[in-house]
Each structure stands twice: as structure tokens, then as C-alpha cells.
Image (cartoon, grey):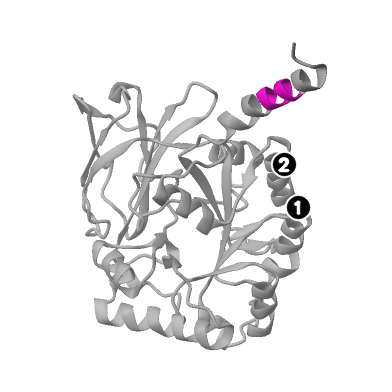
Amino acid sequence: MPTKMFLRHCWAALLLFLVAGPALAADHAVVLMYHRFGEDDVPLTNIRLEQFEAHLDHLAEEGYSVLPLAEVLDALANGGDLPEKSVSITADDAYLSVMTEAWPRLKARGWPMTLFVATDPVDQGLRRYLSWDQLRQLRDEGMTIGAHTASHGHVTFLDPAAARRDIDRGMDRLKTELGLSPTLFAYPFGEYSLRLRKTVAETGFTAAFGQHSGAVGRSRDRFDLPRFAMNERYGEISRFRTAVSARPLPVSDATPEETLLETGAMPTFAFSVGGGVDPAAVACYHSTGTGAVDLETEADRIAFKAPSPLPPGRSRFNCTLPDGTGGWYWFGRQFVTPGGKD
């Protein structure tokens, strides 16, 4: 006859399985990207502090696991499971407000952060940028440092040798000043091409991130990884909730494969969907138009034409599908054409 203590342990184990088991079953995560914190005179790259605090409160209240970026990527690459609600937090460029505003709020919650550092502004001692001493302090306190080139220029338009020199120069400065050789890379402005992706891979990085929206899943190319960008305009809590609840739309064979296009082109974008997704249920939006674009579907293939000629600079599309739980399956891509402004 089982004792009461034995039965109590059995029930406890069962409850632990029911609670913890499904939570560790995800094959995706959302990566968030910030730049400045509380620098309200630069709204395009800033998140207001009340917005950022609302983001952190939402993650805590809804039970999200805020994980180191490398841990997320390792799990996805090696077949490991992630908590169902997994998020990583990143920032680009090495602005001072990362240290003065973002990091104390994250440390108070025990949450990690990855900072992608462009080294020329640090070397030049530019106003509102971190110094090398401050970066060493952040490194020692556990912040992950990633690479972001030396110049933070439009390296997509450089030939491979010049792009490699810029990347290597940044890596040399990180090695010299911080003793680090980062394995994670973020493309300046989120701009990349097939040629630049190849250069970054050959440099020895294990993954590279853009600024196109979507969740990171197992099938996404490791040098074409999405992040949800947060700034004042796109940082309201309703949009944040949508972003962190995103799941990767199961996509393959996306065309055009090249993301560096000619200004004025009106390309046809296409991709195949898997996982039993009904192509007719997907909606796609392009930044050059208003509202959903008209889709052509055949079997598992979705195709649509840019609604107007691509302007100079960056453009993107997002395709979404309700996931049945209030969230969205999401697939985004960013393209770049010559002649744009920062």
C-alpha cells in the first residue's frame, strides 16, 4: 500500500512534468534589437525608457525566458529544446545609454544582453558612445560582445576584399581591447547580400543577424537571421506583444535569393511553405505599398510582385499567418538597393 508521502511525491513529479515538460518544447525564439535607450532626441534609433520598462514588465509577467543569444543558437543548431517563450535581447552600435539605462534594468532582473560593437566610433571617442574601459566593464559583468564591423558603413556595396578588411579591422580592435574574438555578427543597417553573407561566413562567424522581422527557427539560414527592431515608433506595447509571440513561418526556396537589387526594380518574390500551411491563409505586406499585396498561390508556393518600383535604400516584406493562439507565424526579408540614405 503506497504511503501518503510516496503519493505526495508522485503527484509533485506529475505536476512538475505537466508544468515543465511542454514549456521546454520550442524550436524557435524571438531576438529583439535596440540601439539607444532614453535618448529622446533621436527617435528613429531610440526606445523611450517607459517603453523599455513596459517591454521588460511584459516579458516577466507573461513568463518569457530571456536567454543568452549563443545559448539559443546552440540549441537550435544541435536539436535541443528551448522554453516555449524564449527571447534574446540585443543592441547595436555601442551607445552609452546601453550601459547607463538598459544594462542596469536587465541586471536587476538577471537577464543577459548581446551588444554588437562597431569599433571606429569607440576609437574616435564619439559623444554618446561607450569607451573601451566601459566596454571592458560590461564584458566583465557578463554582457556578450558581438561584431558589427569597424566603420559601421554600407559594406554591402564594397567588394569582398574591402568588406573583409573592414570586418577584420573591427575584429582586431575587439581582440586588442577586450581580448575577444566574437563568433556572432550583425550587419550594419541590416544590409547584406549573397556576397557579404559569404564573406562573413568565411571570416569565421557562426551566425549573422539583419534587421528584418521574424522569429529564429531551425531552418533559417544562419547568416540571414531576423530580429525585431524596436524604436519609439515601433516600440509601443501592442507591437511588442505581437513581436515576442511570433513563431517562424515554415518557409523554403525563397526567391530572389539575392537581397542586393537594382533601384527601380519590381521583383517577384516567392517562397514555398511547409508544415501543412494553407498558402491562401497567408497575408504579405511590402514596405513600398499600403495594405496586403495580391498573392498568387499554386500548391505550396506563394508569389507576389513588389507593388511599386524599389526605391533607393532598404525595403522589406513581411508575411504572416495567425497561429491559432493569438500570435502569428512570421517570415520577413529585407532588400537593399543603391543610393539610399542612413
Residue bounds of the magenta highlight: 9-15
Residue 42 occupies quadrant: bottom right
> Which tag, 1 or 2, sits closer to the chain's start?
2
As drawn, 243 above or below 274 = below
Q: Secondary structure at mark 1?
A: helix
Which residue is under mark 2? Answer: 60
Label disc, if present, on residue 125 of the rendered structure: none
As drawn, 228 above or below 149 = above
Residue 232, position as x, y percentages in the image = 62, 52
What's the CA distance linking mark 1 and mark 2? 9 Å
Give the overall secondary structure of the magenta segment: helix
Q: Amino acid at mark 2?
A: Ala
Q: Residue furthest right?
A: 4
Which residue is under mark 1? Answer: 109
Q: Residue at left 55%, top 25%?
A: 326
Residue 109, position as x, y percentages in the image = 76, 52
The residue closer to the viewer here, 170 or 188, is 170
Q: Residue at left 21%, top 52%?
A: 265
Query: Badge 2, how many Cα within 10 Å: few under 14, some, many 20+?
Result: few
Q: Residue at left 72%, top 41%?
A: 60
